[in-house]
Image (cartoon, rainbow, N blue to C red):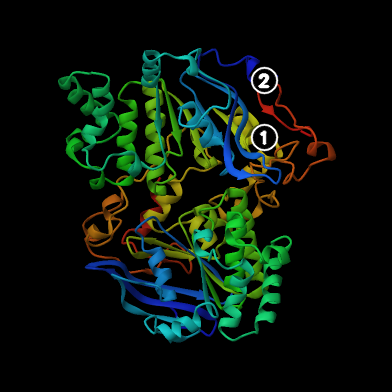
Amino acid sequence: MADARADTTLRISGLKVSVGPFQVVDGVNIDIGKGEIVALVGESGSGKSLTALSAMGLLSGRVVQSGGDILLNGERIDPLDEQEMSRLRGTRISMIFQEPIASLNPLLSVGEQVAESLFVHGRAGRAEAWSKAVQMLADVGIPEPEKRARQFAWELSGGMCQRVMIASALIAEPDLLIADEPTTALDVTVQAQILDLMRRLRDKTGTSILIITHDMGVVASIADRVCVMYGGRVVEQAEVHQLFRAPQHPYTKLLLTTIPKITDTPKEELYSIKGTVPDISAFPKGCRFRTRCPLADDVCLLSPELEAATGAQGGLVACWHSDKTETLQ
Amino acid sequence: MSEAQREPEQSPRPVLLQVDTLKVHFPSGRKSLFGEEQVVKAVDGVSFRVHEGETVAIVGESGCGKSTTGNAILGLAPVTEGRVSFRGRDIAGLGPEERASMWRNLQVVFQDPVAALNPKRTIGQSIAEPLAINKVPKTQQNERVATLLDLVGLNPGQKDRFPNELSGGQRQRVVIARALALEPDLIICDEPVSALDVSIQSQILNLLMKLQRDLGLAYLFISHDLSVVRHIADRVIVMYLGHIVEQGPADILFRAPRHPYTEALLSAIPLPDPVLERAKKRVLLEGDLPSPVDPPKGCPFVTRCPIREARCADEKPALRQDEYGRETACFLR
């Protein structure tokens, strides 16, 4: 991977996370450039959410970061330094989650919650923070923002709450927004609105976005670059068009083949990947996709490194047989 | 009056399930300003039928009443008005024995296989339960469990496993095996793959399609995921705020949606292809679903409709059938 450049907002380097004896994130490297939208895709147990939580310093209990570095604008941050992290959170890195209603405080009006990150960090007085919050609510497309600002989360719909979350995440103009399945709990018509909003905010403010999702449609819609995770490792990384046009890792290729698409011929048998997503307590030795991969052989008992892909410019892939991925149906 | 009373020309197959102007209204638990009890009109006059061996999908977003419709058919939600009949017999008027025989023919698969299986029973015991209730002899039960496990792609040797020893996809296979135990004619599938990982969804969809081919099953398939519905459905019903706004053959509905809501719903699905996805024309809807306690007086979709006119706010459009067998409730289309 290239050296840290000035325009790299976030660099996750060699990240390891363990839960008790199990290594659930195993050496993940991700760079997010300024104003870039990077999607982190994977299924359950792939380690995508833990990777994001590590960057926010939000791991807790038995889940600990056991290795690696996180650099924000080239400076190493220490996720264990609670004071430093709480200064960074909400000002330079913000995060939104899947369940907007669960993430909002039911006892504070939404306006107070949006304004909070400004006056808590001493960036504005209460009155100024409030008027900025109302403006921010308007920016994220909430009608009648003055009235809505006085309402509570439970008075608003899920889509509205997610807009409030985005407003409170972006009001302090952070360098990076981490969005963990931000539209999974929302209806598709509302999802389309929220994706559109995130795209426009990035264009306007230049905020970098790391979006975590399992939905390849969401990836295709919003991402500039994609990291595909499987079994706690990044198995492929590429520019979005390249990833969909010429996936280099067998898992990416098969995943794209297996998902039901609205453009498919109906009633036809879908291609399916054999086996199931491995449990964190029983990752296979070597390449973790080995047991489900049609290309696997003895070489795959050794873990492949994430290296420049031969078939795709600028892309990275962790597979011994990526030259044969194209032949997979 | 009721649109379902008109016999569609196609489908010579016998009708299994018929739903006529079904209404399910719940008390909201709140009173209005004038002390009247407010009601949530979860399902408000829905009519459709399911024929033998076909898959009818009900689609729509949360709060549209699709699951409540399924629950009302299953007797899990109170029917306020209207009629549900199975093989021509009104479900409400059945005696205990007829009712039991109907339940043998009508089964259900829910979204969450973890909640649907008793964690303290082996999967073999769970699958055998409907057999035991229907007094199938023990020896035959074991044989049948083995056949069923095989049918859903599990190893019959796994019958002594507990649900927690299985993956999500395997557990959903067990739930399907149990639903098949009494050889039903119709299975109501309420979001059967939504809780599963994407690489597992296609396995379960293939299984459902194979079982339909082999056993001649009919499905009432309730889902919010239109890509999944595209694969499995013969006919599609689109619901919005307790009403059917459009229904018809899947192929026509997906290729040429007519109702502005169906159009918006289809255009909102992000396509897993950045070239198509970024080039496509989007119909972005404004706002959110209105409250089912206080739905619009006219067309249920009027508050968000991009093509609405004045009369849409006052009059409720009825479903009108076109030459393709598609029924649309819209004045303007």
Q: Is residue B37 above or below residue B216?
A: below
Q: Is residue A280 above or below residue B220?
A: below
Q: Is residue B77 left or right of residue B112?
A: right
Residue A30 drawn at (x, y percent)? 43, 72
Residue that protrudes farthest toward the right in the picture: B310
For mark 2, what is the residue?
B2
For mark 1, what is the residue?
B256
Q: Quadrant of residue B275?
A: bottom right
Whether residue B60 appears in this view of the structure is no
Amino acid type, callout 1: Ala
Quadrant housing the C terminus of chain B:
top right
Q: Is residue B127 above or below residue B164?
A: above
Q: Decide which of A245, A230 is in the foreground and name it.
A: A230
Q: CA distance from mark 2 to mark 1?
A: 25 Å
Which mark is on residue A218? Answer: none
Whether residue B44 appears in this view of the structure is yes
Which comes before the other along the chain, label 2 or label 1? Answer: 2
Q: Decide which of B73, A247 is in the foreground and name it.
A: B73
Q: Is residue B55 left or right of residue A109?
A: left
Q: Secondary structure at mark 1?
A: loop
Which chain is disc 2 placed on? B
Amino acid type, callout 2: Ser
The structure residue drawn at horizontal position 44% and vertical position 79%, both measured from the top left corner, is A2
Residue A129 drawn at (x, y percent)? 66, 79
The structure residue drawn at horizontal position 39% and vertical position 13%, both measured from the top left corner, is B98
Is the C-beta separation of discs 2 and 1 under 8 Å? no
Q: Secondary structure at mark 2?
A: loop
User: Label 2: few (<14), some or many (≥20) within 10 Å?
Assistant: few
The structure residue drawn at horizontal position 21% and vertical position 57%, both measured from the top left corner, is A298
Q: Quadrant of residue A106?
A: bottom right
